[in-house]
Image: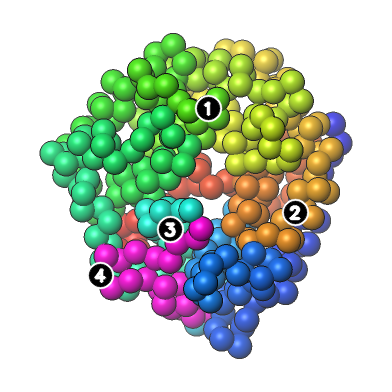
């Protein structure tokens, strides 16, 4: 396995961001052309909110602190541009392709929180699950647990973000965690017990969007060893986790995050197997790194979150092979991306 200087990639990808930074319209206005995935629907602004929000998240994951790197006027301009995409009725933000309003909400919470701003309008998207009485019926009816990978975006940008707001009570949190614990499969560590997933990828892809709730509330996850067993078993012979993807996938990031999440609670359990698994993936990944960078530059910036978050997790799991003078993070573990209470108007 080769050593990878992340600072070189960081400088290169930052230069790519700046190639479509429309500073004349205000700092933080990133508008990719159709060549870079900008033209994703008939709406001429489609993808522009995600572009500017994701780049705020990306720059932060790669170690930038906006309170010192930007002045107050730049941060305000960036927040104003992001808030220009918020709808006054329900407080939702512009979606990207198949993503839901709740996914866009999670993206907005992350970007605006990093910039020290506030949303313009109250978010009404939490209303269907904002009390102890409403949240269990919502979990049981609003999420298709057989399609958990995509459906869990609702949980991530909904239940998880709400849990860190000023409106979430201790009783509400107790109700959510009690339900989640009871619906975990004690043999696999996957949700939801008794549910048949439509394919082999759903459980891991969905689980990664729920685990941050446990991490950010310092709640013990009931079956970390079983979860590690499941992730190890899911790895393909080639070294990745997304069977048939042909390149880097968010599912690979999800697997690495799960290893990192479980490390603090499993001690030395299967540590050698985890290390071998990370090495196998890293060798597979490094063989496709140039391909991943090429794909990134011809895609919407949202794709970059996968690559950058994966590198951040590899820096943590294999620091001798992935290094920078900055500490990178990832989209799930980084608590600074979930400042819901701070961005609430």
Reading the image, the residue beneath label 1 is 199
Reading the image, the residue beneath label 2 is 295
Q: Residue at x 37, y 46 (%)?
A: 154
Q: Is residue 226 left or right of residue 247?
A: left
Q: Position of residue 19 (x, y in %)?
A: 72, 74
Extreme residue in the front direction: 42
Q: Position of residue 232 (x, y in %)?
A: 62, 19
Q: Position of residue 287 (x, y in %)?
A: 84, 38
Q: CA distance from mark 3 to mark 4?
A: 15 Å
Quadrant containing the N terminus in the rendered view: top right
29 in the magenta segment? no
Give the magenta part as a residue range.
74-97
Q: How is the image coloured?
A: rainbow
Q: Quadrant of residue 193?
A: top left
Describe the element under mark 3 as helix, strand or loop. helix
Of labels 2 and 1, the one closer to you: 1
Quadrant containing the C terminus in the rendered view: bottom left
Circle number at residue 89: 4
Tell me the crowding category of disc 4: few under 14, some 14 to 19, or many 20 or more residues within 10 angstroms, Cα based. few
Of the image marks 3 and 1, the number of the one nearer the N terminus: 3
Of the image marks 2 and 1, the number of the one nearer the N terminus: 1
- Residues at circles 2 and 4 in contact by the CB criterion of under 8 Å: no
Describe the element under mark 4 as helix, strand or loop. loop
Of the image marks 4 and 1, the number of the one nearer the N terminus: 4
Tell me the crowding category of disc 1: few under 14, some 14 to 19, or many 20 or more residues within 10 angstroms, Cα based. few
Q: Is residue 153 visible?
A: yes
Describe the element under mark 2 as helix, strand or loop. helix
Of the image marks 3 and 4, the number of the one nearer the N terminus: 4
Q: Residue at x 43, y 45 (%)?
A: 153
Of labels 3 and 1, the one closer to you: 1
Q: Position of residue 165 (x, y in %)?
A: 28, 53
Number of numbered discs visible in the structure rendering: 4
């Amino acid at each position: 396995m080769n050593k990878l200087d992340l600072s070189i990639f960081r400088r290169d990808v930052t230069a790519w961001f700046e190639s479509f930074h429309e500073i004349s319209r205000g700092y933080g206005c990133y508008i990719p052309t159709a060549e870079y995935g900008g033209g994703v629907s008939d709406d001429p602004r489609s993808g522009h909110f995600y572009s500017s929000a994701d780049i705020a998240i990306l720059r932060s994951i790669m170690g930038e602190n906006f309170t010192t790197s930007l002045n107050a006027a730049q941060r305000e301009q960036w927040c104003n541009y992001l808030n220009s995409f918020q709808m006054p009725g329900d407080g939702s933000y512009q979606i990207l392709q198949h993503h839901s309003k709740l996914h866009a909400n999670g993206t907005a919470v992350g970007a605006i929180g990093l910039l020290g701003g506030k949303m313009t309008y109250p978010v009404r998207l939490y209303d269907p699950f904002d009390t102890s009485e409403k949240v269990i019926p919502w979990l049981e009816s609003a999420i298709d647990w057989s399609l958990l990978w995509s459906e869990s975006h609702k949980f991530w940008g909904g239940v998880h973000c709400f849990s860190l707001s000023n409106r979430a009570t201790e009783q509400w949190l107790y109700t959510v965690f009690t339900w989640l614990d009871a619906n975990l499969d004690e043999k696999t560590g996957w949700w939801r017990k008794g549910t048949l997933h439509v394919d082999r990828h759903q459980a891991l892809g969905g689980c990664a969007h729920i685990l941050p709730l446990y991490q950010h509330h310092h709640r013990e996850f009931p079956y970390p060893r079983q979860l590690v067993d499941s992730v190890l078993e899911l790895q393909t012979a080639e070294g990745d986790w997304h069977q048939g993807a042909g390149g880097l996938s968010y599912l690979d990031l999800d697997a690495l995050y799960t290893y990192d999440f479980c490390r603090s609670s499993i001690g030395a359990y299967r540590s050698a197997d985890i290390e071998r698994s990370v090495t196998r993936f890293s060798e597979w990944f490094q063989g496709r790194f140039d391909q991943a960078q090429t794909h990134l530059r011809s895609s919407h910036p949202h794709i970059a979150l996968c690559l950058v978050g994966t590198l951040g997790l590899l820096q943590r799991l294999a620091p001798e092979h992935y290094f920078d003078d900055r500490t990178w993070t990832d989209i799930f573990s980084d608590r600074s991306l979930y400042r819901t209470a701070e961005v609430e108007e």
